[in-house]
Amino acid sequence: MHRIPRPRLRGPAAALAAAALLGGVLTTGATAQAAPRTDGRLTDLVNPFIGTQNEGNTYPGASVPFGMVQLSPDTGHNTGYDYGENHIRGFSSVHLSGVGCGLGGDLPTLPTTGDITETDYAKYAAEFSHDDEKASPGYYKVGLKTGIDAELTATQRTGVQRYTFPATDKANVLLNAGQSLHRTLSSEVEILDNRTVRTAITGSGFCQDTKPYTVYTVTHFDRPFTTSGTWNGDTVTEGSKKSSATDARNGAWLRFDTSKDRTVEATTALSYVDAKGAALNLRAEGGRTFDRVERAAQRSWEARLEGVKAQGGSDELRRTFYSSLYRSFLAPNVGSDVDGRYTGWDQKKHRAEGFTYYQNWSLWDTYRTQAQLLSLLAPRESRDMAISVLRIDAESGWLPKWGYGTVETNIMTGDPVTPFLTNAYQQGLLKGYEEEAYRALKKNADGVPAADSAPVGREANVEYLKDGFAPYIKDRPHAKPGDSDYDHGASATLEYALSDGMLAEMARDLGHDADAARYDARAQNYRKIFDPSTGFFRARDASGAFTGPADPAQSEGFHEGTSWQYQWMVPQDIPGMVDLIGGKDSANQRLDSFFAYDELLADPAKTAREVWVNGPYAYYNADKYNPQNEPDLIAPYTYLSTGQPWKTTDVVHAALTLFTNGPTGMTGNDDLGTMSAWMVLSSIGVFPVQPGTDTWGLSTPAFERVDIELDRRYYPRGSLTVSAPGASDTDRYIQSARLDGAQQSRTYLTTDDIRSARSLSFTVGSEPSAWGTSPEDAPPALG
């Protein structure tokens, strides 16, 4: 969740009222909303505007599940759309939901009228009002102040636009190839005929310059344009058919006569391979009317959402739940063309055979929640995603850390690819690829990429393997673009040790016993940065001395967090960590302080908003829970291991009040569905407490009943029902649990439990009980 705030004028964030514990109605002041509910469709509950203000960095535009194209308006915010702004620069074809830096925004397209006098989209941007804006899954519409209505929808590899102009002989569509949300290095545009325009756009950057990538587009209109031209820099040339530019504005404009027929439709196909790929994608997925494409997109989303049917809960809760479920299916994204070709990280063309190739890997974020949710709800796609990550290793020589398109960005730190892939293995998604995956993970865990390769991998691995910790070396020059593990030595140590614990489990399963023992030992390296004098984890410098402020709330060397927030990130060995800090009583006292538990009981929603860390970029100088960032996502479930599981429910349900049905209703950046997946899983009451394994912690569901449809190829029973009759903001404590009718005293399930069961049922009450409080009921330490 690499977030870089920038000072800028913004609309005021809407005031947020206190909510009932399980999701009372909140007033946000928002006017743009999801399309109104008409016939009971689950898609009508989804509000794509959630998270579009206060740096949630979501987008409201049109896409299909995991689609290559995300056609959405850009308003001037560095990641695309901000609800507080009132001008649209264009509707561009590439967006990632919830990223923290400028990325994508390729080919912003805008309808205009009159003469072409400006070539900078910040100057020719069209004003709009949220009163004239609406969105639903696969569809977006806005009325521009210029008198033009714009509608967007999408297929997997194409974006479809419909513009309704006023009556004029100067109705224009501007295709801007030279400006985007990141740096555009070069661009080419070519008008092929009186209906078709082709572009090639080479860009770079995600929080910093990276190796370049190229996206190819072809746009086809449903009617011929009357005249056309290009622009290059400030120069507009009517009749020109081609234009190219390096690091400069560049584009094409097409003119239509809408005196009689006021509607213009256009379909833009993408390819990360070549112009031929874009043409093939257009031929395969284009040629349909806007209305047909929109209906198909809506059906694809309805089919996804119908896989989870929730009953009970307030209307607010249902809307935020299904909106979160929707965002969980937005990425990773298809990267291969309809013929199976894709561009690998070696920048060569390859063909995916027997699987679909995916790209865009925000692994530091998604390995904690979204990867596990997709393994349940989309296992076929999840298998292809894992295979795609293995292709990156095979073709480029190393596994990814944070990959965008066809390149590594090296954003974030640690070793997130290991729990991502071991999760895929533990969920049964890597059959036939087990040893290939293990070899790649072992290479990644035991080495460092070559100096002349793009990835940094485990950058501090030499020191970690020698001394048991990654040193914190302040202001050390970066050897490669991106983040450096040396800048965050303490948290990198915890991340490496977590990954070692997960890899040990896989090694043991595959019979690599010596490796398993070695990784088990390394999984205990979290102890190497424990400072007995403070009772907290603390960074160590290259000499081994503890460094930085002793106050754990002011600590250094932790990526986007403090020692307080990283205290609980030892999922491979919570019992060992608890012993380090003095046992369960000490741990519970520290947890209670961390979550402000007494205040939370008195007013959960107020505590969540005013006492916990509040602010999408508030990473440091805090001793309280940060529900808006990844390092703390598992923390509420620590109580499952300290004999007080009812407190997990209290904290989780308080955190759920932070998800609301308005533009500010997101906890921090969504990070390709990470926060949304946390909301979905926590609402269901089944959460991956040891990411990278097959362990799922339990808490009281936010709904009375959730029916989950499961793929029988991976889950033979085909469904799982999680029920908690009578669950409410007062009756929220588990009194007992049953798995297919058998008593379930453990506070966790395994994936095999989910495969073999049809029902998980909870009896709830108004007071905590002894359920799950015995030591043997807690999730076990690994190894």
Image (cartoon, grey):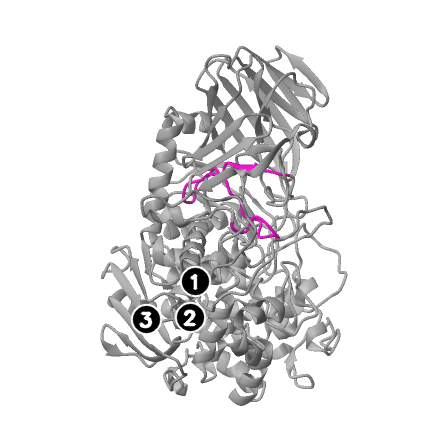
Which one is in front in this view, the residue at disc 3 or the one at disc 2?
3
Disc 2: which residue? 505
The quadrant of the image that shows the C terminus is bottom left
User: Cα distance, mark 1 to mark 2?
Assistant: 8 Å
Residue 304 drawn at (x, y percent) = 35, 48
Mark 3 lies on a secondary structure that is loop
Q: Is residue 29 visible?
A: yes
Q: Residue at x 53, y 60 (%)?
A: 416
Q: Residues within 10 Å of mark 2 (few under 14, many from 20)?
A: many
Q: Which amino acid lies under the numbered mark 2 shown in the image of this protein?
A: Glu
Q: Nearer the viewer, residue 255 or 377?
A: 255
Q: Position of residue 529 (x, y in %)?
A: 64, 77
**Residue that badge 3 annotates:** 724
- Residue 704, by quadrant, is bottom left
Query: Circle 1 is placed at which residue position?
Result: 422
Q: Is residue 441 magenta?
A: no
